[in-house]
Amino acid sequence: MMITASQLRAARGMLDWTRNDLAKAASLSPETIKNIEHGVFRPQEATADQIRRAFAMHDVEFTDDEGIRFNREGIKQYSGADEFKRFMDDVYTVAARDPEAVEGGKNPIYVSNVDDRLFVEHLGIEFINMHAQRMSELKNVKVRVLVGMDEKHQVPEALHHIEYRRNNSQATGDVPFYVYGDKFAVLMFNHKPSPQIVVINSKLVSSAYRAQFDILWKNTEK
């Protein structure tokens, strides 16, 4: 879906963003934003994806009828490899703006039943390295990961924000999930297009899974 100049200007207006604000959020130059809005050129698909992701992180979506809208539903779904990256962008955005997740690791990100090989397959090693680097640069961010007894993980020393523990309990089931901020996400890799990710934005749900995770974490092996 192509982004038009009028959509871009309207979307910035919804968030009261300057061109510099959008450029920073989308990792583009202000000159690129200016040229798109002035109709000098239309963005390439990769550039449009960067812009869409930047707005999506702030609940603004572009619609098929060349419109825009706020999307603040309690449940959001991501489908396929490209949207898997959007999900990981959301994990980073929440960690970056959530004081409890960053300052002192009071509200860490919890991950259960992940298979790193599936992340490499669908995200690509370049994106994974970029995500790991930006997460490690956040002040005191903490990520706790429960893995199965048979899984092997080699964590580079530079990724000091991640701690793995082995879980020999079936209490969490086999489906990978994330708890980050007030969000609970289920990741399904056996659905097409893969993966399918369902995110519930609910403090009640996320708190319940945090409590379950905490119990398991205290009784597992580093």
Image (cartoon, rainbow, N blue to C red):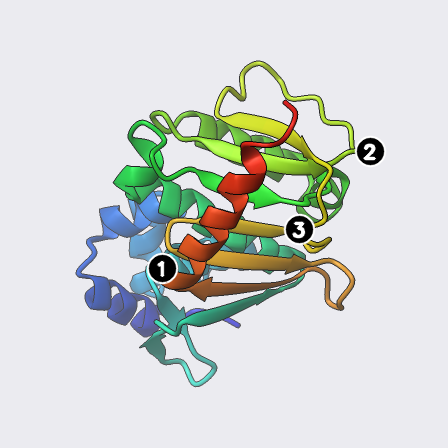
The answer to whether any part of residue 127 appears in the image is: yes
User: What's under tag 1, amino acid-wise?
Assistant: Lys
Residue at coordinates 43% horizontally, 69% vertically from top-left?
3
Give the distance between the C-alpha atoms of the residues marked 1 and 2, in whole angstroms: 32 Å
Q: Work out whether mark 1 precedes mark 2 in sequence or the reverse, and give the earlier one.
A: 2
Q: Is residue 207 found left or right of 104 in the rendered image?
A: right
**Which residue is more in the foreground, 163 or 90?**
163
Q: Work out whether mark 1 precedes mark 3 in sequence or the reverse, and give the earlier one.
A: 3
- State the SS at label 3: loop
- State the SS at label 1: helix
User: What's under tag 3, amino acid-wise?
Assistant: Ala
Q: In this view, does 103 lie above or below 98?
A: above
Reading the image, the residue beneath label 1 is 203
Displayed quadrant of residue 138: top left
Report x, y in % for residue 113.
68, 45
Q: Which of marks 2 and 3 is in front?
A: 3
Reading the image, the residue beneath label 3 is 171
Give the distance between the C-alpha atoms of the residues marked 2 and 3, in whole angstroms: 16 Å
For residue 150, which numbered disc appears in the image? Answer: 2
Report x, y in % for residue 215.
53, 41
Displayed quadrant of residue 194: bottom right
**Which residue is more in the foreground, 102 or 173?**
173
The local crowd at label 2, few if under 14, some if 14 to 19, many if 20 or more residues have their Cα within 10 Å, is few
Q: In this view, does 168 lie above or below 61?
A: above
Q: Work out whether mark 2 precedes mark 3 in sequence or the reverse, and give the earlier one.
A: 2
Q: Do the residues labelled 1 and 2 touch (CB within 8 Å)?
A: no
Q: Which of marks 1 and 3 is in front?
A: 3
